[in-house]
Amino acid sequence: MIDLRSDTVTQPTEEMRAAMANAVVGDDVYEEDSTVNLLQELAAYQLGKEAALFVPSGTMGNLAAILTHCRRGDEVIMGDQAHTYVYEVAGMSALGGVMPHTVPNQSDGTLKLDDIRSAIRGKDVHFPDTRLIVLENTQNRCGGVVISPEYMEAVGNIAREHNLKLHVDGARIFNAAVKLGVTPETLVKEADSVTFCLSKGLCAPVGSVLCGSAELIKEARRIRKQLGGGMRQAGILAAAGIYALENMVDRLAEDHARALKLANGLATIPGITLRPGSPHTNMIFIELDAVIEKPLHQIQAELKANRVLVGGSGLYGFRLVTHYWITDQDVDEAIHMFEKVLSSEVV
Ligand code: TLP
């Protein structure tokens, strides 16, 4: 299968599996797993933070961060296209009593600074306390778009001026850093916390890391335990994460280049329109023109019958994501299969 549904489908490489098999492990709830400890040190160092916490998923990392920053009844400002808002099962509200206050994501993934400012509540007996701002980099639903260090800093300044915290959902922060040619640290300087994922483009089978101050991570460790995310001999998994951070970051540029090649090929097929600016990193968003009468799910099924898996995006489109296991040949094949499946449709 040529699986373009997400970079979450990546399987560990042979070398990564060997690192996992040979990992020294201990009980991480006692903080005695030296491989987990090493991953956390490495992650904190790379993100320029004091400390880090290995968590089972990006969703848990974001939730642990929000629950650490906020109390019940607090409000969090985030984009209406934020993964934390759209795809995290309302965990912050269900488990933490925290209310999202959404402002529109612009097509470049940012939130207007004035929208953020006007979403911040004043002190009033009627209002919840605004506690936190959440940004996402790269911004998934806006196209895997990269947010600049200057913008991150501008939002950081607003947070500080209003005594708020800033959390970055950096599930794909390494894609952003590679694309911009900067260190991930540069992108999250202003952030009080950042989550990044090992199990997306970096190819690890499981895991994300939450980074922040030593004090924040100490509290997040309690919250992780409360959420049932305290793991035992997790060094088996952390070993894949260490391998990923040491070997899989720079090569993300290859995924970006293949995404561009795939996008250029798809754009030549009648009936397909690329979302403006797509791709920014490893995600391609396409829309099908009205001339295509086949329903989306049928096109998806026909592509699948031809070994190509793609994800749906909205009513008329697809998302395709490149990653370690997508080769140049796969890109050519996927373009060919789109041509084949759509050819009978366009007169
Ligand atoms: N994103 C997944 C799906 O959940 C949509 C994907 O296929 O892109 N933040 C961002 C920006 C993400 O894209 C994701 C996963 C997460 C957090 C959650 O990570 P996991 O899946 O590890 O909980």
Image (spheres, grey):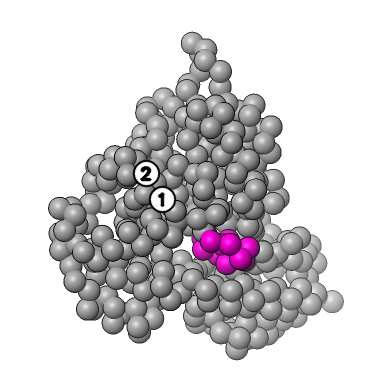
Give the residue type that dot 2 points to. Answer: Ser
Q: Identify the residue at image location x=63%, y=29%.
A: 117
> Percent from the top left, x then y, of residue 70?
40, 32
Instruction: Name, please, the residue furthest toward the bottom.
Output: 329
- Asked if the beta carbon under badge 1 is closer than 8 A to the nearest atom of ligand 1, the reply is no
Q: Main secondary structure of the magenta part?
A: helix
Say whether marks 1 and 2 touch (CB < 8 Å): yes
Q: CA distance from mark 1 to mark 2?
A: 6 Å
Q: Magenta stretch: give its range.
A: 172-183
- Residue drawn at point x = 49 percent, y = 11 percent: 125
Element at badge 1?
loop
Q: Measured along the vertical axis of the image, is residue 44 above or below residue 124?
A: below
- As drawn, the residue found furthest toward the right would be 347
- Picture quarter containing residue 319? bottom right
| Disc 2 secondary structure class | loop
State yes or no: residue 173 in magenta.
yes
- Whether residue 291 appears in magenta in the rendering, the answer is no
Can you tell which quarter of the image residue 31 is in? bottom left
User: Which residue bears the numbered disc 2?
Assistant: 213
Q: Which residue is mark 1?
A: 49
Residue 26 is labelled as: none
Query: Residue 317, position in %: x, y?
Result: 67, 62
Residue at 53 percent of width and 69 percent of height:
5
The numbered mark, 1 or 2, whose residue comes first in the sequence reads 1
